[in-house]
Every structure is written in C-alpha cells, then in structure tokens.
Amino acid sequence: MTTQLRQDEARIRRQVDMIVEGLQSKDLAALRHVYATDVVSFDIQPPLQHVGLEAKLQNWTPAFTLFETVNYEVRDLTLTVGTNIAFGYAFARLGGTLKNGTTTSGMWVRVTYCFRKIDDAWLIAHDQVSVPLDIAGGKGAVDLQP
C-alpha cells in the first residue's frame, strides 16, 4: 500500500470516528461533515432509502430524541481504499440511557460504508445498515454478537 493510500485510510477511519463522536455528543452539525450532499442511505429505519444529506441527518434525530445519553460503537472496521473510492464494513451498536431512565446496550447491526473523495475530503456517499433475518420466523435476529 502506498503512503498516500495509508494516509487516505487514516482519514477515512477518522471520518468513522467522527460518526461515533457526533452521535455520542448528539451533534448533528458534526455529522454533516461526514456525508456527501447526495448520500443514499439504506438504514435500518423505514423507508427503504433516505436520499440526500438532510434525509440522512433527519434519520439520526429519533436517536437524539429517545436517548438522554447515546453510546455508539463501531467494531471490526475493514476498509478497501482506492484513489477516489473506498468501501468498508463493520459492526455497529447504538445504545445508551433512554429519556425515561432505562439503559439499553442496543443491538449489533452490520454496516457498509461507501466513500467518495470529493474536493480532497472522504465523504460517505452510501451506507447500508442491516440485521440478519430469521427466515422461518420472518423477524430480524437482533440478539447476535460479533
């Protein structure tokens, strides 16, 4: 791997760290700097897709509304980096203390990130979050651990 690609990988990892920091501080403005303006997100919440930066940011709003404190963890981030495109995958978990005082560790989900280098910044152009499906029961398997 070239020095430039190693530097780009470090910058992308920092972007993912900014997601964690933005969520834990409940700071939508910080999250704004992580996503491309035309981001397409296949998130865990309906609808099937969220298109554009404002839709993606709006998708995080329920977490800030439901939780008094937010804990967000990304585990096992694996990246493949090119000159202008990169992708990665990881496990992520959103939890914390709800407004009613209940604490939840949350559930692990699978997340895939697609990055584009735009004006020398690595931004998320697409992300997808999913849970495994118990086909026989027709429900998400939300109790799995990485």
Image (spheres, helix red, strand yellow):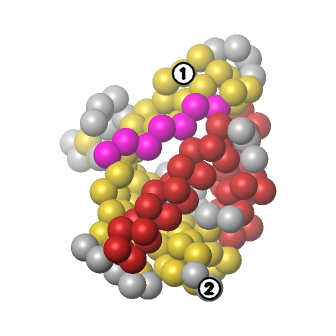
Q: Give me the C-alpha separation between circle 2 and circle 1.
A: 39 Å
Disc 1 target residue: 104
Front residue (pair 17, 73): 17
Q: Main secondary structure of the magenta part?
A: strand
Q: Earlier in the sequence, mark 2 or mark 1?
A: 1
In percent of width and height, residue 75 lies at 37, 42
Disc 2 target residue: 119
Task: Kindly indicate the quadrant of the structure image that contains residue 91.
Answer: top left
Extent of the magenta region: 70-76
Q: Amino acid at mark 2?
A: Asp
Q: Secondary structure at mark 2?
A: loop
Front residue (pair 112, 87): 87
Residue 115, visible in the rendered structure: yes
In percent of width and height, residue 86 lies at 39, 74
Q: Is residue 117 left or right of residue 6?
A: right
Check the image and report above or below for 26 versus 97: below
Mark 1, Cα crowd under 10 Å, few <14 / some 14-19 / many 20+, is: some
- Look at the image and say whether residue 81 sits in the magenta stretch: no
Q: Secondary structure at mark 1?
A: strand
- What quarter of the picture does the N terminus occupy? bottom left
Q: Is residue 73 left or right of residue 24?
A: left
Q: Amino acid at mark 1?
A: Thr
Residue at the front extreme? Answer: 3
The reply to whether the C-beta atoms of the residues labelled 2 and 1 are less than 8 Å apart is: no
- Look at the image and say whether residue 73 sits in the magenta stretch: yes
Residue name at image x 49 percent, y 79 percent: 116
Residue name at image x 54 percent, y 59 percent: 15
